[in-house]
Image: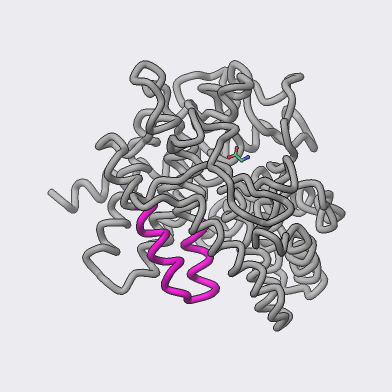
Amino acid sequence: MIQFELETDKTLFEDSFRFAQKQVKRTVEKHPDFYPMYTTAGKWKHEGPAWTHWCDGFFPGMMWIFHKNLAANGGENVEFWLKNAIRYTKPLEPRQHDRDVHDLGFLFLSTYYRWYQVERDPALNDVLVQAGRTLAMRFREKGQYLRSFVADNSLFIDIMMNVGIILYAARETGDKMLREIAIRHSLTTRRVLVRGDGSTAHEGLFDLESGEFLKQTTHQGFRGDSCWSRGLAWSLYGFGTCYEYSRDPRFLETAEACADYYITYSPANGVPPWDYNAPAESRKLLDTSAGAIAASGLLRLSRLLQDPVKAHFYWTTGVRIMRTLCQEHLATKDKNWEGILKGGVYHIHKNLGVNESVMWGEYFFVEALAHILRQ
Ligand code: GLY
């Protein structure tokens, strides 16, 4: 019986991985050199605003994942994905100096990091290191955090997905100050944005004069005291990465607390509402991108745990989420839909990308699929 389920899963995940490639290829051919962010009625190209420019790594990032998987398994299109991954990655290079966003981990760990793993050209590593140094410039001594893109007094939970590039740069260069900044930021985030029950707030505000933490608030969640599911997924994944680089057990403990909250309060099929504390009617709106991020984060976390029972639990939960996404949320039946995964939510209050495909959902979905298929 177990064997049968595994075989069914294998086919489901392989078919889904092929579908993801088909959709990305279609977008490359239909909109050459365009960097999609979120769909409107299933179409990537529209006049909707970006709010902030944080997503350009995810589209080429998927191409790097396809390339790696196919190169290892002798599939077709290896050259196609390599050529296009480089074509879409190169234009990001100047953004290693971008001081307007807090998203340099999203941009470069999905692209230059993957490229460097393939070619080992030191010039590629230099870009990664510079991106880490640039992000570290956002650090505020008073308050001990990397400020978000919205204001100097603002800390976002999303930044936990980006501190990895500072830790990477610290490791590559031996620069202790970089490491210190990443650790201090993560400890502050743990203290002010992760609650005792493992839930998370989206944003924290500080007094700029004293550095004192003032309150939890939100942009994309339901309320300042609610738990926005994507923020929780960023935290689960981000603290896991922070532990992977630092080996500081406090970060593993935090990642596990977030994972346990996610598992406890999400529906049995693993795909959460957009915010766990939104009113009941609103909670019917899911965020599949939070599901994809959490699945990928749980698969990674399962490798880091000492306890084999808990590791197995996280792995099988990640697989369960992916099974639901593949069976119930893929755009396979809608021939006009340009994305892979339906049902993501970008910014509900601004009405951007609500119940649509979103580029980070696509990327982490593909990352989790590739992780499962490697086993
Ligand atoms: N700005 C990151 C997010 O929408 O999750």
**Which quadrant would the C terminus be assigned to in this image?**
bottom left
Tell me the residue at 55%/37% (across/down).
217
Q: Is residue 185 visible?
A: yes
Q: Residue 82: where, in percent of width, then height?
A: 70, 55
Q: Would you say 313 lies left or right of 209 here?
A: left
Note whether 133 is above or below 277 in the view shown.
below
Q: Nearer the viewer, residue 69 or 351?
A: 351
Note whether 219 is above or below 192 in the view shown.
above
| The image quadrant in which ligand 1 is located | top right
Note whether 190 is above or below 54 in the view shown.
below
Q: Would you say 309 lies left or right of 257 here?
A: left
Q: Nearer the viewer, residue 295 or 213?
A: 213
Note whether 329 is above or below 87 in the view shown.
above
What secondary structure is the magenta-colored segment mainly? helix
Residues rendered magenta in the picture: 238-259
Q: Residue 359: where, in percent of width, then height?
A: 61, 37
Q: Would you say 320 lies left or right of 97 here?
A: left
Q: Is residue 80 visible?
A: no
Tell me the residue at 60%/25% (across/down).
338
Q: Residue 11: where, in percent of width, then height?
A: 34, 44
Q: Residue 181: where, in percent of width, then height?
A: 67, 69
Residue 125 within the magenta-colored segment of the rendering: no
Residue lying farthest to the left in this orientation: 1
Q: Nearer the viewer, residue 196 or 213?
A: 213
Tell me the residue at 40%/46% (across/down).
199
Tell me the residue at 74%/48% (across/down).
152
Q: Nearer the viewer, residue 159 or 67?
A: 159
